[in-house]
Amino acid sequence: MKSDTILVTGACGQIGSELVLALRKQYKNVIASDLKEPTGELKESGEFVRLDVLHKNGLSECVHQYGVKQMYHLAAILSATGEQNPELAWRINMKGLRNMLDVCTESSVQKLFFPSSMAVFGPHTPKVNTPQYTVMDPNTIYGISKQAGERWCDWYFQKKGLDVRSIRYPGLISYKTKAGGGTTDYAVDIFFEALEKKKYTCFLKEDTLLPMMYMPDAVRGTIELMEAPAEKITVRSSYNLSGFSFAPAELAAEIKKQIPDFTIIYQPDFRQSIADSWPKSMDDSYAKTDWGWKPEFDLSAMTKDMIANIEAMQETV
Ligand code: NAD
Ligand code: SER
């Protein structure tokens, strides 16, 4: 077991609830923190500290008390919630990150992970195989905050020598914790509704192609990036990361192979214009070349695994 103490903010969310468990398999001391209380395995498997990322003193005290060496800063407001509450999204996504960056440089923390997003791209970005370096004109508060966050991370690396590492995740699909207010949430909710009600009303149009990734790949990729030798990391803003792309109709067809009486209807809402501004696929060759990134799941494997795991969870309830 590795001995570095790790602090994870936003640990009770969709990514944190799985990333913390994966980190705890490799590291002796992984402290989960969030505004809300953990449940289940997350609660039982290790330390939890209630922390608000807007309160720098609390963060700083926790870092000093536990001798934290690495931080994963997951706390944020996602795209759809952010458009409905721009002030809150800006405050948490920007002030929260600045607090983390400052606490790192004022303490023993040596490495910080910042999750960025495909939302840093915008309507004028090339949509197919979106390059690592290209036009970036995000038009959501979430995307603007993530792009500004990437620039802050790069600045702290260049000017203060902080070992900041980051990934531009596509939409993430998982079954352990439901998605937290994003535009790609449909690709999680659809599975629960398909199994429970055999029907789903999708808030995106049937042909809305978006980059996506299954959570086991995202968690593995995140830890691989953080474990890579520093000299391999050539991107200090954020790495494009790809799994596979699909539209709602393609996902519905894949689910129908397992649940033949499943039906879907489409009622696009405000999230459609957010999705329309994002890439359809992303070029992640920098991540592949620099630190050996390779996704394992495709649409079919992810769909089978999601359905099997949700069914297993429902049987045990
Ligand atoms: P989530 O919404 O599921 O979880 C975020 C967590 O942060 C929640 O548990 C929430 O209680 C906590 N939080 C909110 N405000 C806080 C505060 N002031 N102090 C402390 N905790 C606070 O989000 P997620 O899907 O797990 O995403 C984690 C990170 O990854 C975010 O930065 C998000 O932008 C990024 N990301 C996620 C996806 C995705 O598809 N899930 C894709 C791209 C990027
Ligand atoms: N999945 C996220 C969202 O939809 C993308 O960062 O907000």
Image (cartoon, rainbow, N blue to C red):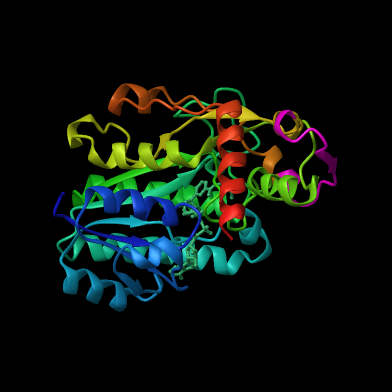
Residue at x-position 29% and y-position 69%: 47
Residue at x-position 71% and y-position 45%: 190
Q: Nearer the viewer, residue 37 or 281?
A: 37
The image quadrant where one finds the C terminus is: bottom right
Q: Position of residue 1 (x, y in %)?
A: 16, 49
State the image quarter where residue 84 is shown.
bottom right
User: In the figure, 274 relative to 38: above or below?
Assistant: above
Q: Is residue 179 visible?
A: no
From which residue to which does the magenta span run?
A: 257-273
Q: Position of residue 86 (x, y in %)?
A: 61, 64
Q: Is residue 65 visible?
A: yes
Q: How many marks?
A: 0
User: In the figure, 91 relative to 287: above or below?
Assistant: below
Residue at x-position 54% and y-position 32%: 135
Q: Nearer the viewer, residue 212 or 29?
A: 29
State the image quarter where residue 306 is shown.
top right
Q: Position of residue 180 (x, y in %)?
A: 58, 58
Q: Is residue 157 magenta?
A: no
User: In the figure, 317 relative to 274: above or below?
Assistant: below
Left or right: 60 in relation to 84: left
Q: Position of residue 174 (x, y in %)?
A: 54, 46
State the image quarter where residue 98 is shown.
bottom left
Q: Is residue 271 magenta?
A: yes
Q: Nearer the viewer, residue 39 or 311?
A: 311
